[in-house]
Amino acid sequence: MPDITSHLRPGRCLSLALAVALLSPLAAQASAGFEACRTQLGDKAIAEGVSANVVRTTLPTVKELQRVVELDRKQPEFMQTFASYVGQRVSNQRVQQGRNLLRQHGAFLDGLQQQYGVPARYLVAFWGLETNYGGYLGKMPTLDALATLACDPRRSDFFASEFVNALRLVERESLDPAQMQGSWAGAMGHTQFMPSTYLQYALDGDGDGQVNLWRSERDALASAANFLRGLGWTPGLRWGRQVSLRDGFDYSLSGKGRGANLGEWSARGVRNLNGSALPAADLQAELLLPAGHTGPAFLVYDNFEVVKRWNNSENYALSVGLLADRLAGAPAADYANGEAEPLTSAQLRQAQEALLAAGYDPGTPDGILGSRTRAALRAFQLASDLPADGYPDSTTLAALLPQN
């Protein structure tokens, strides 16, 4: 999410003690207890221009939520397969509901596309993935969640800034803090904006003079369009497409940072899923194999990277694109064919440690299949004469962990 630059309100003076406190990382204050940290947050908010009255009336109600810390520390036991991930998010029910909403908000969404360049199907797809079209906005008190994470050492600076931004929203939009609820990490409303994103990109889409992403679907949709334009959305360009690969394809050409134009991909034997030729367009694309060489293949364009700036997850971005395609009439697809059983996070962490020991850098072993781990796997596979798709299938793991 974009950062919001804070400024001191003109004419406001800081005591020396407060100035020193603001120079210290907020995490250092956490050991003094939540109440002391909460006071520091209030001082920080006032120093950065939030009304003292808003701070005075809001801060005493803010509570520490141990459940938030537990969720922040929690890691999934299994690495969810691509087919499972997409199947849960691009369900037939979600597609049908999304198509109904496209008709219901048709004229409004058309106006947003003309103004911001983002087609209606993408706005509705984001809406569907974030909150199931408003079906679940989250039940965690936003200010409590943000203060709890701000007073926890792991990412205190980020969440302290977001807490101050949430107080700015209370002041700017006359929001009732008791009604501000969302995810455990502080994301809010139909489109799950963090406070900094809400401040910078949220719009009054329904013309009532207030921006409320909880109660107004039009505010949420207009805000999503504005946010995507701010992230760099290219009008007239789709997210990507599913493709087929010829026998003997060089899988080492896949992955982040290995882009080529569509003509080059055609020469390498990449075709549309129905076997027809790719469009004759001067477009750069990267080839993604989210489930390895036995699973589906996708060419993705610049707008795919824009989707990832909303949520930096390859599977999330693919789900947005695939849901948008289904909303526009594309048929359902089964992505489970040939997909391996999911690894546990512990198994993937073990593989990452083995890669490090073998001289391949996957980053800090964390049990998450990110881009650095995929690059390290691809390098290992190339050296081991294996299909270099960057995916930890059973053959790759057997070569990497022969003792197993």
Image: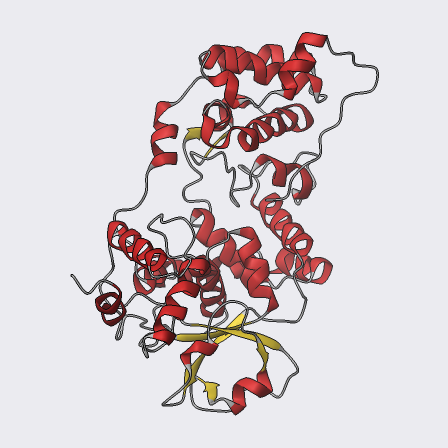
403 above or below 154? Answer: below
> Could you tell whether 72 is left or right of 46 in the image?
left
Q: At which x and y percent is residue 316?
A: 44, 57
The spot of residue 69 in percent (x, y) is: 38, 29
Whole-percent x, y for residue 375 in the image: 44, 65
With 340 as the anchor, is 91 left or right in this view? right
Residue most extreme to the right: 11
Where residue 159 sits, quadrant-wise, is top right
Frontmost residue, 46 versus 276? 46
Quarter of the image for residue 96 reads: bottom left
User: Residue at 58% across / 31% down in the picture?
Assistant: 162
Q: Is residue 329 visible?
A: yes
Residue 328: horizontal and vertical position, in percent?
Answer: 50, 70
Which residue is pictured at 35% across the width and 72% down the height? 381
Frontmost residue, 2 versus 363: 363
Pick the quarter of the image with the N terminus. Answer: top right
Name which residue lies at 47% across and 85% down. 272
Name the colour scheme: secondary structure
- Establish if 242 lies above or below 193: below
Position of 66 with respect to 163 (left or right) is left
User: Closest to the observer: 213 or 267?
Assistant: 267
Q: Is residue 383 above or below residue 147?
A: below
Query: Residue at 49% across / 32% down in the picture?
Result: 155
Question: Quadrant location of the C terminus?
Answer: bottom left
- Please give the count of numbered marks on the rendered protein: 0
User: Please, is residue 296 above or below residue 358 in the view?
Assistant: below
